[in-house]
Image: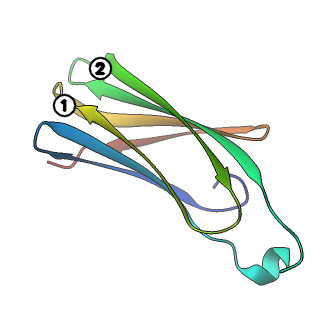
Amino acid sequence: KIAGTSASLSAFSYEESVYATLRFDGLEEKSYGSENVIQIPLSVVFSAVESSGAECDRAEVSALYEGKELFVRTKFTDYDIIKIRCEVTAAVETKTFEAVVAR
């Protein structure tokens, strides 16, 4: 959980590229009310990890979470990438997610 909601990271390989998606669930309207506007700035740093355990590439993405389902995506050239690590900062909270690349 981060920013008051559940989040999950997934990654897959397709035609020489690795695609990574960080998904944030939407909040139920009753939990924040239709009048209240949520705007949480997100900083998402995706790191590609190769089989030796070393980071071989990185991508930083900014997004704005507004209480609705949100997908933050990136793509890497596949240099034998085995997993994606993702560090998410939402306001003052930071969490790290990891996902093994599906082949």
Kind of residue at badge 2: Gly
Answer above or below: position of 94 versus 49.
below
Label 1: few (<14), some (14–19) or many (≥20) C-alpha neighbours in 10 Å: some
Q: Which residue is mark 2?
A: 53
Image x and y of residue 75, in percent? 32, 39
Going from the N terminus, do you reach mark 2 or mark 1 first? Answer: 2
User: Does 14 sit left or right of 40 as displayed?
Assistant: left
State the residue at coordinates (19%, 38%): 17
Kind of residue at badge 1: Asp
State the residue at coordinates (32%, 16%): 54
Q: In what element is the residue under mark 2?
A: loop
Answer above or below: position of 102 versus 45.
below
Answer above or below: position of 25 versus 83.
below
Q: Which residue is mark 1?
A: 78
Answer above or below: position of 51 versus 38.
above
Q: Residue furthest bottom?
A: 30
Alpha carbons under labels 2 and 1: distance apart = 14 Å
